[in-house]
Image: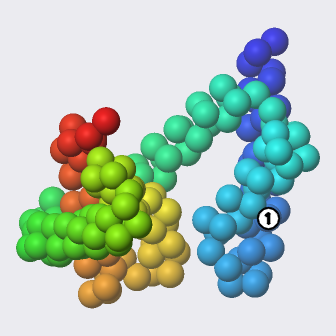
């Protein structure tokens, strides 16, 4: 019986998402926002069409995996090597300066060092899946700014593990 519930939820998600994304595309809005709207509408705090949080978590993980896989198909190791300076220099500067700026601002408000560093880490990171999807939809992945964004996102994905090890609490 559990399988039927999952299938029902998948049909609801795909059906509603197709309709909403179609409408968003008509108004030249990013489909990522349409998918977010679908979740809000169908989820437990919207119309409640899907209420099993466990199923939602599983479907969300599958969705992110498929999205990143699709984007990964379009990139080669050669392209990544070409932008290695952007990855390490650009990404390092973006993350480092963001963490430092947030840390300094929060110190003005007497936030503890541990919390200031942690919040700096949070502010420094972006959603690779969402940003790459938007760039892909706008056919901007191979533009100069698309390559810079991709490089910085790759760095953020690499730096997340050391950040988790350094979280001070």
Q: Residue at x 68, y 59 (%)?
A: 36
In the image, residue 135 above or below residue 153: below
Q: Residue at x 31, y 85 (%)?
A: 145
Q: Residue at x 80, y 21 (%)?
A: 4
In the image, residue 62 above or below residue 133: above
Residue placed most toward the observer, 78 or 9: 9
Residue placed most toward the observer, 14 or 83: 83
Which residue position holds label 1? 20
Q: Quadrant of residue 55?
A: top right
Q: Residue furthest right?
A: 47
Image x and y of residue 15, in percent: 81, 51
Q: Is residue 35 left or right of residue 166?
A: right
Image quarter in which the C terminus is found:
top left
The reply to whether residue 102 is visible in this rendering is no
Q: Is residue 88 left or right of residue 66?
A: left
Image x and y of residue 110, in percent: 37, 61
The reply to whether residue 96 is visible in this rendering is yes
């Amino acid at each position: 019986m559990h399988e039927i519930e999952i299938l029902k939820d998948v049909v609801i998600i795909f059906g509603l998402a197709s309709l909403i994304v179609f409408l968003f595309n008509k108004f030249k809005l990013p489909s990522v926002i349409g998918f977010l709207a679908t979740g809000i509408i169908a989820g437990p705090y919207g119309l409640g069409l899907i209420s099993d949080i466990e199923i939602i978590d599983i479907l969300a993980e599958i969705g992110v995996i498929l999205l990143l896989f699709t984007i990964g198909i379009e990139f080669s190791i050669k392209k990544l090597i070409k932008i290695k300076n952007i990855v390490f220099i650009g990404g390092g500067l973006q993350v480092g300066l963001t963490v430092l700026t947030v840390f300094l601002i929060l110190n003005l408000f007497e936030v503890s060092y541990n919390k200031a560093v942690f919040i700096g880490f949070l502010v420094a990171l972006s959603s690779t899946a969402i940003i790459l999807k938007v760039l892909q939809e706008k056919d901007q992945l191979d533009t100069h700014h698309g390559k810079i964004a991709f490089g910085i996102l790759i760095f953020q994905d690499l730096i997340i593990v050391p950040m988790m090890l350094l979280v001070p609490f």
